[in-house]
Image: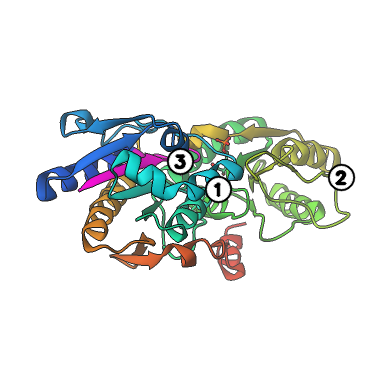
Amino acid sequence: MRIGILTSGGDCPGLNAVIRSVVHRGVTEHGDDILGFEDGFKGLLERRYRPLDLNSVSGILQRGGTILGAARVERARLREAADRTGELMTELALDALIPIGGEGTLTAARMLSDAGMPVVGVPKTIDNDISATDVTFGFDTAVGVATEAIDRLKTTAESHQRVMVVEVMGRHAGWIALQSGMAGGGHAILIPERPFRVDDICEMINARFARGKKFAVVVVAEGAHPAPGDMPYETGVIDKYGHERFVGIGNHLATELERRLGKEAKPVILGHVQRGGTPTPYDRALATRFGWHAVEAVHKGAYGMMTALHGTEIVLVPLAEAVSRMKTVPPERCLEAESVF
Ligand code: F6P
């Protein structure tokens, strides 16, 4: 078969492991021709692709980023691709497409699938917010980076008797904040699912200082926000890809904590550091399994589906189910984290 593969949306550690796995399984087991589209759906629309053989994926398992390039694409352009699905498939002589991406990419994949394109999606995001799969690759790596940062910040915070506000990624779901905050022993964990009150954080920090602990680390997801009227804070603006761009909760919160507490509070924005670099062994293994199962799904004709992790098994779920809602942090998970405050 002639199978196209693309990596779309933001990059994520483990993308190369999927590409490698698709090529290995497709070429060695099924004799497939694998075409790699460059820069996600842009490459598909602009007919920019290259053949991928075993040599072209050699040595990429542990590499961060994506050898194919990734890009966000406006919804209107994706609609254009969906409308021209038949034409594209015939022109490129493609039998199937494996798009690897987050919510936006999987929504586009569903659109293409509904328009008749034989598609099998593979989920990725460091945010871990895609429903229908227990975990996405990239998350474990991001949590590792954030946890290491929290560990490091604790020693310098303690030396200077400071409050550190660590802003991690997570626009709509606080998984990275929750997991790294728990693993690193953050003293407050603020997530989009649960609006916070600055006075509650101040109370906790003052209690710590009163107990003789002269520092604190607050872990805040980029999409976390104060309860209405609690502290001045503007919500983000929506960019041309339909994503909310935030104004920097970490900076705002550090300023407000310093003002209310009368103690030094420093913001640390981890940003894209969480998305870069080598994937953890867990992410490499999960990405490899997703790639393997995506090729098998193509050969079974299981189109309109997405690979997913359920427990320890890789299963196929409808793309429609995966994009129907976002996987957010359940409130009881916050209670587990709070026990470490
Ligand atoms: O979706 C993953 C994510 O890492 C978000 O947490 C973050 O807001 C966003 O991507 C940033 O993406 P970019 O700056 O690449 O557009």
How many labels sit on residues? 3
Residue depicted at 30% across the width and 50% down the height:
96
Residue nearest the observer in this picture, 261 or 7? 7
- Going from N to C along the chain, the mark reached first, 2 or 3, is 3
**Which residue does the numbered mark 3 point to in the structure image?**
8
Residue depicted at 63% across the width and 53% down the height:
172
Label 3 vs label 1: CA separation?
15 Å
Looking at the rendered structure, the secondary structure element under dot 3 is loop
Looking at the rendered structure, the secondary structure element under dot 2 is loop
In reply to whether residue 76 is colored magenta, the answer given is: no
In reply to whether residue 8 is colored magenta, the answer given is: yes
Amino acid under disc 3: Ser
Amino acid under disc 2: Pro
Q: Is residue 273 left or right of residue 222?
A: left
Q: Position of residue 18 (x, y in %)?
A: 30, 44
**Which residue does the numbered mark 2 point to in the structure image?**
232
Q: Position of residue 54 (x, y in %)?
A: 16, 34
**Range drawn in magenta:** 1-15
Q: Are marks 2 and 1 in contact (CB under 8 Å)?
A: no
